[in-house]
Image (spheres, rainbow, N blue to C red):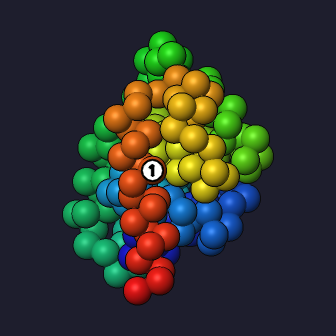
C-alpha cells in the first residue's frame, strides 16, 4: 500500500521505482504522510481523500489522519540546520529532482538525510568523508553504513 502510494507521488515529480525502493529502505511511515499531502487536491480535499482510500483500499480514517495531522517542519526551521543545504545539494547532484526533494524535506527530512548518507556509502566514500561532506554526526553515518553493509551481506545468504 505505501509502496504504491509513494510510487504514484514520486512519479508525479519525475522519479522512478528504483528511487522508491531506495526511499523505502528508511522508514516508510513518514513517506505515507508525504504521499497523502502530495496526492490530495487541496481544492477538493474530502473527495480526494475518499478517492485515494477507495483506489488503494485504505480506510478513509487513515488517509484523513495522515493528511490532516501531518507533522511538517517549516522551511525556515530546516534552513537553520547546518547540514540542510549540503544534504539537499548532494541529493540534487545524485538525482536532479529539486521539486521532489523540497516537497519531501518538509515531512521526511530525517529519512532524506539517511538516504543521502546511504547513497554516499554505496559510492564507497569513507565515514570521515561523508561526515565532512554533509556535516552530520559520526553516529548517524556509522548507523546508516552498518545498515547498508547488512543489506549487502544479506543478499549473499
Q: Is residue 122 left or right of residue 135?
A: right
Q: Using the rendered image of the protein, determine whether residue 107 is visible from the camera's viewpoint.
A: no
Residue at x 57% of width, y 41% of height: 126
Query: Where 64 sits versus 129, above or below?
Result: below
Residue 40 versus residue 90: which sits nearer the camera?
90
Location of residue 129 in the rendering, given as x and y in whole percent from the top left corner: 60, 32
Mark 1 nearby-residue class (10 Å; few <14, some 14–19, many ≥20): many
Q: Is residue 52 above or below residue 40?
A: below
Which image quarter: residue 60? bottom left
Residue 35 appears left or right of 19: left
SS at mark 1 in the image? helix
Q: Say which residue appears at 49% left-offset and 70% top-offset.
A: 152
Residue 58 percent coordinates (x, y)? 31, 75
Instruction: Write down the residue under mark 1.
Output: 145
At a point 46% along the width and 45% down the height, the residue shown is: 114
Residue placed most toward the observer, 45 or 118: 118
Amino acid at each position: 500500500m505505501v509502496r504504491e502510494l509513494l510510487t504514484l507521488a514520486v512519479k508525479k515529480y519525475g522519479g522512478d521505482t528504483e528511487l522508491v525502493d531506495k526511499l523505502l529502505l528508511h522508514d516508510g511511515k513518514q513517506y505515507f504522510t508525504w504521499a497523502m499531502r502530495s496526492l490530495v487536491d487541496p481544492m477538493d480535499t474530502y473527495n480526494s481523500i475518499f478517492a485515494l482510500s477507495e483506489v488503494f483500499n485504505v480506510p478513509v480514517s487513515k488517509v484523513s489522519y495522515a493528511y490532516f495531522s501531518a507533522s511538517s517542519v517549516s522551511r525556515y526551521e530546516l534552513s537553520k540546520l547546518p547540514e540542510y543545504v549540503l544534504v539537499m545539494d548532494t541529493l540534487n547532484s545524485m538525482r536532479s529532482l529539486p521539486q521532489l526533494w523540497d516537497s519531501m524535506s518538509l515531512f521526511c527530512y530525517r529519512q532524506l538525510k539517511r538516504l543521502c548518507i546511504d547513497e554516499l556509502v554505496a559510492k564507497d566514500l569513507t565515514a570521515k568523508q561523508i561526515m565532512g561532506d554533509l556535516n552530520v554526526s559520526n553516529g548517524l553515518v556509522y548507523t546508516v553504513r552498518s545498515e547498508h553493509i547488512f543489506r549487502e551481506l544479506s543478499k549473499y545468504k
